[in-house]
Amino acid sequence: MRPESIYGIVTGAASGIGLATCKMLLEAGTPKVGMLDCQQEKLLAVWEELAATYSPDRVSQFYMDVRDPEIVARTIEQFEEWAGCLNLAVNCAGVLLDGAVTSVSSRGVKRYSLEQWETTLDTNLTGAFLVAREAIAAMLRSRAPDNSIDDCRGLIVFISSISRHGRAGQAAYSASKGALVSLAATLSQELASYHVRSVAIAPGLVDTPMAAQIPGWYTKDMLNRVAIKRMGRPDEIAHAVRFCIENEFFNGRVIEINGGAF
């Protein structure tokens, strides 16, 4: 797939990897980019900046909570109406609610709350599933005007994490991110006959608003495990998204971008 033939949506587009991905697509010549996020004011602000730079004809913004199946379906239909079709969905939306499953203190045994667990999985996993499900339906309904019959019709990208291997204090986050890799592999098999690919990208520690939530001592410990001793940049992850778009032999697998973390 060529960036200039992409009609795509990006969730979590108001900041971090999602925003960097939108910028990458626009810089690469993508004609239609839909920015999706639940942070309405922040989304509007960054959309105004990009629309002024690249034209409001090429980039639009949609307020959307990935956890609501009706809103997800309606938003993707609205994008189709605006863009004419859809052939890319990049799932960047996510939350990080750290905490050990159980821990002991002077007050006794503390348990990770069910509410935190459900919020994490509802956003990171179920939300990505809902977006993928509706995006795939859209891809099967339409194709980009300049695609030939032999072109891949679509691509689903899931932003996972190296935490998918398991990380103390991140049980819910790790579980949700690990599941995204399995979901990408499964969809790649289900969708092959429709010329739709499904892939995952697993970043290490990246300089985003989410990473800013992590306690300083924990961040320092994580950076000590990174060979190049720095955080990744959102644009470096967006570059991997472009690779996934352009390399049509890449399918059903995950790319880890972690600076040599061990």
Image (tube, helix red, strand yellow):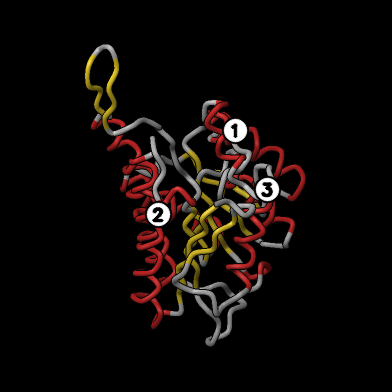
Comparing labels 1 and 3, the label whose residue is closer to the camera? 1
Q: Tell me how far mark 1 sits from mark 3, CA to CA.
A: 41 Å
Check disc 1 and report the residue beneath it. 220
Check disc 3 and report the residue beneath it. 56
Q: Which element carries disc 1, helix, strand or loop?
A: helix
Q: Earlier in the sequence, mark 1 or mark 3?
A: 3
Give how far across and how far down residue 144 sits, in percent: 56, 72
Comparing labels 1 and 2, the label whose residue is closer to the camera? 1
Check disc 2 and report the residue beneath it. 131
Q: Is residue 117 left or right of residue 247?
A: left
Q: Which element carries disc 3, helix, strand or loop?
A: loop
Q: Amino acid at mark 2?
A: Val
Q: Amino acid at mark 3?
A: Pro
In front: 45, or 212?
Answer: 212
Q: Earlier in the sequence, mark 2 or mark 3?
A: 3
- Looking at the rendered structure, which numbered label has been put on residue 117? none
Give how far across and how far down residue 135 sits, in percent: 42, 61
Query: How many numbered marks does the figure carry?
Result: 3
Quadrant of the rendered image containing residue 50 = top right
Q: Which element carries disc 2, helix, strand or loop?
A: helix
Q: Is residue 4 left or right of residue 197?
A: right
Q: Tell me how far mark 2 sits from mark 3, CA to CA.
A: 23 Å
Q: Earlier in the sequence, mark 1 or mark 2?
A: 2
Q: Is residue 85 visible?
A: no
Quadrant of the rendered image containing residue 48 = top right
Give how far across and how far down residue 127 sits, in percent: 36, 48
Asked if the residue under mark 3 is in contact with the one under mark 2, i.e. CB atoms within 8 Å, the reply is: no
Q: Amino acid at mark 1?
A: Lys
Residue at the farthest right position: 53
Neighbor class of circle 1 (other Cα within 10 Å; few <14, some 14-19, many 20+) is few
Residue at x 52%, y 31% (from the top left corner): 218
Residue at x 66%, y 67% (from the top left corner): 3
